[in-house]
Image (tube, helix red, strand yellow):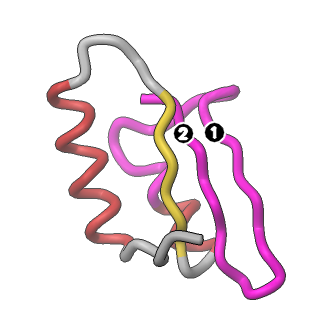
Amino acid sequence: MTKPISEDDAAAQKGRLHARVAGKQWHFLNFATTQAAVNFVNAAPAQVAGEVSTTTRNDGTVGLFYFL
């Protein structure tokens, strides 16, 4: 399992990926909390229906696949 990413680091990574990706690709991040994952999904550019898949684990972490 990967180490959870901080919300700020995830948002920065999303911005860097969005700026350089010509075509959309699937990516994966692991968040420490559900709220951190929700905030990431809603950060610009926000994901829309079908662009996110999540799994909330027993320990409260959230695995998130997103299309960007």
Residue extending furthest toward the top: 23
Q: Position of residue 9 (x, y in %)?
A: 27, 67
Q: Which mark is residue 64?
A: none
* Residue 32, picture quadrant: bottom right
Q: Secondary structure at mark 2?
A: strand
Label 1 is placed on what type of residue? Val
Whether 56 is among the magenta residues is yes
The outermost residue toward the right is 58
Compare residues 13 and 46 and report the one nearer the observer. 13
Locate residue 49: give its quadrant: top right
Residue plotted at (42% across, 29% down): 68
In the depicted structure, whether residue 49 falls above or below residue 53 = above
Residue 40, above or below 34: above
Residue 42 horizontal side relative to residue 8, left or right: right
Q: Which residue is mark 2?
A: 66
Residue in the image at 54% along x and 39% along y: 66
- Pointer 1 residue: 52
Q: Quadrant of the N terminus?
A: bottom right
Q: Which residues are magenta?
A: 40-68
Q: Amino acid at mark 2?
A: Tyr
Pointer 2 and pointer 1: residues touching (CB < 8 Å)? yes
For the image, the number of numbered tags is: 2
The structure residue drawn at horizontal position 58% and vertical position 29%, both measured from the top left corner, is 48
Q: CA distance from mark 2 to mark 1?
A: 4 Å
Q: Residues within 10 Å of mark 1 (few under 14, many from 20)?
A: some
Query: Would you place residue 18 above or below residue 9 in this image?
Result: above
Q: Is residue 14 magenta?
A: no
Residue with the most extreme front position: 1
Residue at 22% over, 57% down = 12
| Residue 53 spot, x, y in % from top left | 70, 43
Image coordinates of residue 60 in percent, x first then y, are 72, 83
